Amino acid sequence: MPEVLELATALAGRAGADEQVEAYVARVRRTSIRVFQGDVESLSSADSAGIGVRVVRGARVGFAWAGSIAEPAALQALEDARDNASYATEDPAAGLAEPDGIGPAALALWREELAACPSGSKIALALDLERRVRAGDARIRQVVSSDYSDTLGESAIATSTGVSASSRRGTCLLHASALAGEGAETRTGSGYSVGRSLEDLDAERAARHAVERATRLLGARKPTSRRLPVVFDPRVTATLLGIIAGPLSGDEVAKGRSLFAGRVGEQVACGEITLVDDPTEIAALGAASFDAEGIACRHNRLIDHGRLLGYLYDNHAARVAGARSTASAVRGSYRTTPRVGARAVALEPGALGPEAILAEVGCGLFVQSVSGVHSGVNAVSGDFSVGAEGLLIRDGALAEPVRELTIASTLQRMLQHVVAVGSDLEWLPGSAAGVTLAIDDMAMSGI
């Protein structure tokens, strides 16, 4: 039994007759390397470990955490959680998760070679990435940053209600930011590659994307306002899916903060849209065998050919709704309690590649990046208005670059007006996959 699970189990076993106890133990090592002009600018490697404890007494829940997994600190966190429970507001849905009989997916999320990899090899990758970006185009004036990072962690959760789970996982990332210029004008662009071992990382691809995204926006001008089809870059689609996943939370639905509330069984999108959250997909960086309450993760189909099938639930949200948990509990760290969240949201890919989608659209706007998402999107009303930059589409191909524009619609209308989902599904950092996505009839505001 892993050490972290032994500690979690021992602490959960101290539950009194009138209480439930949950112990969540985590240990993480993070490495970050930045190079600049051929030299190492910074290198850091930090270890952290801690425990979070929840105690349920009747209808009250107390929580406490400790930044150590030593036994005295763990025992103190348990006593603090008990004390906090006595002051908590009563919650009729209070209670810890219980095993539901579903076995965990066998996912190989840990690579021993990444854990054993020396710093020199990681530095060499970052230096190689910087060289590739600098040599990628004569208009590259500077590689703003070239970074390598990885996260290696293990966690365990045990409850007095019978939950017992542990896992190890690792991820690594290469990222570059490039500055391109012509005359007095400069533009920036970034590229990255992600994986679970150094062999997964593709420096050439990351460099190519950084160079392309910086140089192709040189000469961008503000466009004239009009309505037109819009094609989203996969990174932008991933952002959009992250937005849509929020109001698909059962907790948000129960609180009246979701545009999907009360719409199960309805056609909320066009037939091209099938949306899933599947943490058992090994290619997803958010893949996991268990959720943050120790329940086995599973494939959750949320929208099937446009029809809303249901919402995501953790244990508490499911109790409130009279539903079953979808094993969708997430938590930021041992310092926080679980909440409902998606881990691996993706659209079912279509048949067309990016070039074929551009050809089908004919004339429109290709959006490379968006800004102001948090202030410009309302998950209750569905209003969508964000800043953007990209390139116009003319005769089925990318044309002149544009900037300082706004694209607007509603999420409801956008979902109903999808005309193509690309075949180029790509798992990106975060909780969503990217894919080229074409939406008809959005408003573009420029001059």
Image (spheres, rainbow, N blue to C red):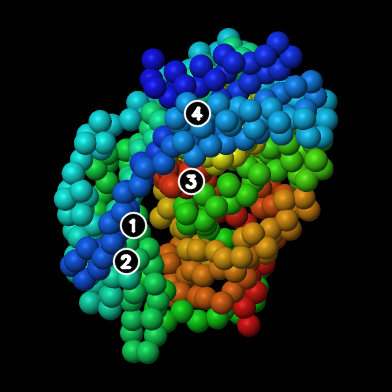
User: Label 2 belongs to which residue?
Assistant: 145
Residue type pointed to by label 3 = Gly
Disc on res. 72: 4
Disc on res. 214: none
Q: Residue at x 63, y 28 (%)?
A: 79
User: Label 3 belongs to which residue?
Assistant: 430
Q: Residue at x 26, y 65 (%)?
A: 41
Q: CA distance from mark 3 to mark 4?
A: 35 Å
Q: Secondary structure at mark 2?
A: strand
Q: CA distance from mark 4 to mark 1?
A: 41 Å
Q: CA distance from mark 2 to mark 3?
A: 20 Å
Compare marks 4 and 1 and give the one earlier in the sequence: 4
Compare marks 3 and 1 and give the one earlier in the sequence: 1
Q: CA distance from mark 4 to mark 2?
A: 43 Å
Q: Position of residue 44 (x, y in %)?
A: 31, 54
Q: Position of residue 324 (x, y in %)?
A: 70, 20
- Say if mark 3 contacts mark 1, CB within 8 Å: no
Between 360 and 373, the one lying in front of the other is: 373
Disc on res. 175: 1
Q: Residue at x 26, y 36 (%)?
A: 115
Residue type pointed to by label 2 = Ser
Quadrant for the N terminus in the image = top left
Quadrant for the C terminus in the image = bottom right
Q: Secondary structure at mark 1?
A: strand
Give the number of the mark in front: 2 or 3: 2
Q: Secondary structure at mark 3?
A: loop
